Structures are given as structure tokens and as C-alpha cells.
Image (cartoon, coloured by chain):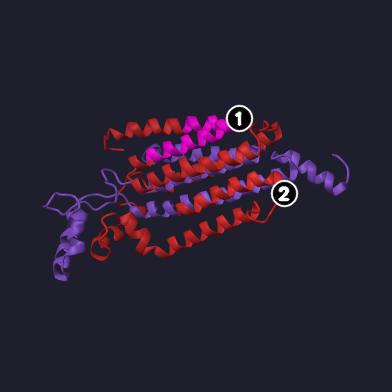
Chain colours: A red, B purple
Amino acid sequence: MDHTDLTQYLDYVLIAMLLAVGFAIVRLRNLFAVVMLTGVYSLLSAAWFVSLDAVDVAFTEAAVGAGISTVLMLGAMLLTARESEPAGAKRHWAALAVVVAAGAALFFAIPDMPVYGDPNSPANSYVGMDYMSSTPNEIAVPNVVTAVLASYRGYDTFGETVVIFTAALGVMLLLGFGTGRREDDDDAAAGKAAKAAKTEDKA
Amino acid sequence: MLEIILERFSYIPIIILMMTGLYVVIATGNLVKRLVGLSLFQTSVFLLYITMGKVFGGQPPIIAGDAHGGDAGHGADAAAGYGAEAAAGHAAETAHHVAEIAYSNPLPHVLILTAIVVGVATLAVGLALVVRIREAYGTIEDDALNAADYSLETGSAE
């Protein structure tokens, strides 16, 4: 907090916009608006990621979160319903109780969290900074995120692609792709299968 | 106490955003909107991780040039193209350089990159399930789904 950095005001504006979009998603019942606002939410968080120096995360979030997720949700919305029913009062209060309890527990944990922007916090001290210092000697890729993703933690990335493959397989099996289903379901299956293939390509 | 909170101010809006997502997941009966809430929650968790990796005055974790050259990309070219001993000498310089410039922590970025892609995979499976439920039941409101299940089990409308 001692640093007077002008970009912090940009951060405050982005936080305010994220909160506004989040509350709008809670209030709205039109699913098209909700899905579009989710895309806006992803894009705003991508902007904040840039401000937080996470440029790789920012463009992945913008492409996958704001792009592919929105397309998938729009497709599912078109195949299902346009409006959501309002939540019952009982349900509203139950959800509020859970949210308040969980939120209070998280607020209680805030003092144990690393200080924002502290270069010497435990989160920023050990293995992450070791990657920073050893990447130029060992990997020779200037982007350390790429080096960690593809080399140091290559098995993680391999596991991730296995997850994507499994998900694509699951979507195809669920929607009966290529099993000669009833005629009225063909459109649904074709649409989702195309999207599943797209998701697979992204990985 | 107030100072402790102020130093960690970024967690407060993020916790509120996480709880917004959780509220949507619990309070909404519509399955598509419930998945929207889940992805809201998920994006907020990404924000939580990335703010932890931020270093004040830091740069994105992309190693820029060498200490005296000043042209970005030279360091990478040198490390990739030079012979072994030149690379070793250069590596010492670059390591020195890393100590001088503050970079943000790359590790949360890597973890969250993986999480974003896995998140869209789970979202795709969830939406496929919703589409199947709609085909089987004709509705995606979970009150109506419960009623349909109830009437199937008991053979009578609720």
C-alpha cells in the first residue's frame, strides 16, 4: 500500500465493474443476458490479469473464458431455455445463509493471507522464484510461464490434455454423436459435437 | 488490525465475487444459470491466485534482454545459440539480471492456465448433461425435474 502506483486506480475501476457485473448476473433472469454478462466478466478479469502481470493468463482467459465458454453456454441456452424461473424465498434464504457463513470464514482467514504485492511473502519466495532464476540457464525460453508449463511441469500439461480428451469424449457420448439417434435430436447432437471438437482443438 | 486488512484489501472484493458465484449456484433452479454461477466462482478463484503472485513494481515473468545490452530478446538468442561456455557465462549475468528486476511470480500463472482449460472442459460436460436432461424431461428447472421424478416414482402427480 506504500507504493503510489497509478495503475492501482485502474484496478479499482476493474474491481468495481466486476462487482457490478457479478450482481447483475445474480439479478437477471434472461439467460441470454446472463451468458453475455459472463463473457463480459471474463473479459474484465482478463484486463485485471494484465494489470497483475499475468499476461499469459489474460489471453487464455480472454480466448477460452470470454470466447469458447460463452459460445458453449449460448449453444446450450439455445437448445434448452431462454428464461430462468425466479428463485423461491426459501431457497434464497438458504443460499444467503451458506454464502454468509462461507464468506465470514474466508474473511476470518484474510489476515493469514500473503500481503498483496509483497515480494518476500511465502507465496512469492521459494519455488516460483527458483523457476525465474533457473529458466535462463536450463530452458532458454524467455517466457518463464511457457518454460514451466511445457518443461518443468510438462506432465501437468499432459494430464490437462487427457482431461480435455475425456471431456470431449464425455460430451460426444452424452449427446450420442454418430449413434444414429432420433431425428429431432440430430440438430442438438451436431451442434454440440462441433463445439466439443472446437474445445479439443483449443487444448 | 485495520492495517492488516488494508494490506490485503484485494482479497475482499475477490471473496465477495466468489460468494456471488456460490449464491448463484445454490439459489438458482435453472441448470444453465447454475453453471454460469459455477464459472463465475471459478473465475474469481483464478483472480485470488493471480493476486497472490503479484509483486509490487514487478514485470510480467518474461525475461527481457541482458543487463547491459538493453535490447529485449538478445538474452534468449544468446542462451539458445551460443556455445556451452558462452551460455554458462551469459547465464550467470542473466541470473544477476533477474535479481535486479522484480518479476511477478510465474507459478500461479501456470497453475491457473491449466485451471482455465480444465474449467472449460468441465463446463462443456456440464452443459452437455443439461442438454440431455432437457431432451429427457423437457425442462431444466430443478423444481420441475424433482416433480417429474416424484411422479415417476409414485405414479402420481405431486
Residue identified by numbered label 2: A182
At x 12%, y 52%, the residue is: B69
> From the viewer's perspective, is B44 left or right of A53?
right
Badge 1 element: loop
Image quarter hosting the C terminus of chain A: bottom left
Furthest residue toward left:
B68
Residue identified by numbered label 1: A30
Badge 2 element: loop
Q: In which quarter of the image is residue B74?
A: bottom left
Image quarter hosting the N terminus of chain A: top left
Q: Give the range drawn in magenta.
A: A19-48
At x 59%, y 38%, the residue is: B23
At x 30%, y 57%, the residue is: A129
Q: Is residue A20 magenta?
A: yes
Q: What residue type is labelled 1?
A: Asn
Residue B37 seen in the current view: no
Furthest residue toward bottom:
B84
Q: In which quarter of the image is residue B77?
A: bottom left
